[in-house]
Amino acid sequence: MGNLRFARLLAGAAVLSLVVGACTNNAGSSPTTTGGTSSQPSQPAATTTGDKPGVGKTVNIAVNPWVGYEADAAVVAYLLETELGYTVEKKNLLEQVSWEGFPTGDVDVILENWGHDDLKAKYIDQDKTAQSAGELGVQGIIGWYVPAWMKVDHPDIDDWNNLNKYADLFKTSESGDKGQLLDGDPSYVTNDVALIKNLNLNYTVVVGGSEAALISSFQTATTQKQPLLAYFYDPQWAWSQPPLVDEPLVRIKLPEYTAGCDADPEKVACDYPPYILDKIVSTTFATDGGAAYELIKKFNWTNLDQSTVSEYIANAGMTPEAAGEKWVKENPDKWAAWMP
């Protein structure tokens, strides 16, 4: 989720294993993953493996911890394997650690980048070990939300100026004598601690532990009418499913975002910006990635496309591999435009 998603928490020191770099020859060795899973190339459907440019080559894709990103990776990996013959290594990594993999060759691709101007400055502008591969097509929104019923019962609760008046409603055992602002996965870089401090709000951030826990909290808060103030975002499959599809969450109006208002993470006192999500690749991969790079550069889909695959993974009991295959088979006209 950028300068944050939007300055995310530096998830501590992480040591990436040395692996074969972008599209390196795979013969005689097995690439090592860092906390991730690997998927083997599928058998070709219509052509022999010799006709495919990726045979014997590996693409290392970072997978960050939210379902929408899993959806991106599922579709791209399926196409790389079945249409182009590559082996794909999916690596479950935190956002910061994913960028650290560019200069070492451990990571070739980040498919969904939420801002991270600080990391772009280091790895793209300064070190020149990474570069943008264009927009993903998905537009990201981050903010603070409450269940719909709270807006009905308290019409002015969606104005940040009134949050202190309602702080007692949001007290929990974890927040003590302050109101609770619930965040999701601890690796998400948010502005929330700074916002609370700089807006003089009588709240404290409590980390829920995962995206799934955050979604469950909002679902319960909606159906059981429990007070909840929490960080949330779009695209997100939960918006299209009950109960949130029938009772959409209400976004808190924080001070309006203006360019540069979040430049100093410790002094942020404005809302999150809208995010035009993009793809980041290593400079080596951009130069030597061949057909794989061309596909990833052209990969561009909508919030609805991503949410559809996310729903397959999160609620339909499908593996990411099966979800990616289903979407690809049902949308040939879309992905045909991405082929090199």
Image (cartoon, rainbow, N blue to C red):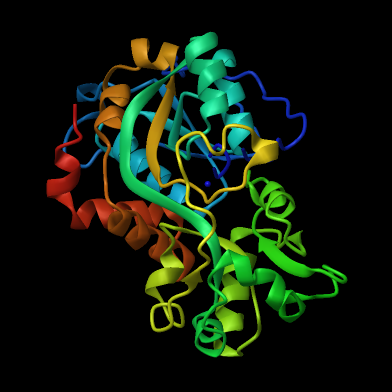
Name the residue located 24 percent from the left edge and 35 percent from the top edge: 83
* Nearer to me, 47 or 156: 156
* Nearer to me, 166 or 23: 166
In percent of width and height, residue 112 lies at 43, 39
* Nearer to me, 3 or 107: 3
Position of 296 with respect to 161 (left or right) is left
Q: Is residue 186 above or below residue 287?
A: below
Quadrant position of residue 164: bottom right
Name the residue located 55 percent from the left edge and 45 percent from the top edge: 5
Name the residue located 64 percent from the left edge and 67 percent from the top edge: 213
Visible residue check, residue 129:
no
Residue furthest out toward the left: 333
* Nearer to me, 24 or 121: 121
Position of 282 with respect to 53 (left or right) is right
In percent of width and height, residue 323 lies at 37, 57
The quadrant of the rendering that contains the C terminus is top left
Number of marks present in the image shown: 0
Position of 5 with respect to 273 (left or right) is right
In percent of width and height, residue 307 lies at 36, 60
Visible residue check, residue 143:
yes
Name the residue located 48 percent from the left edge and 16 percent from the top edge: 124
Quadrant position of residue 165: bottom right
Q: Is residue 19 above or below residue 244?
A: above
In percent of width and height, residue 195 lies at 66, 51
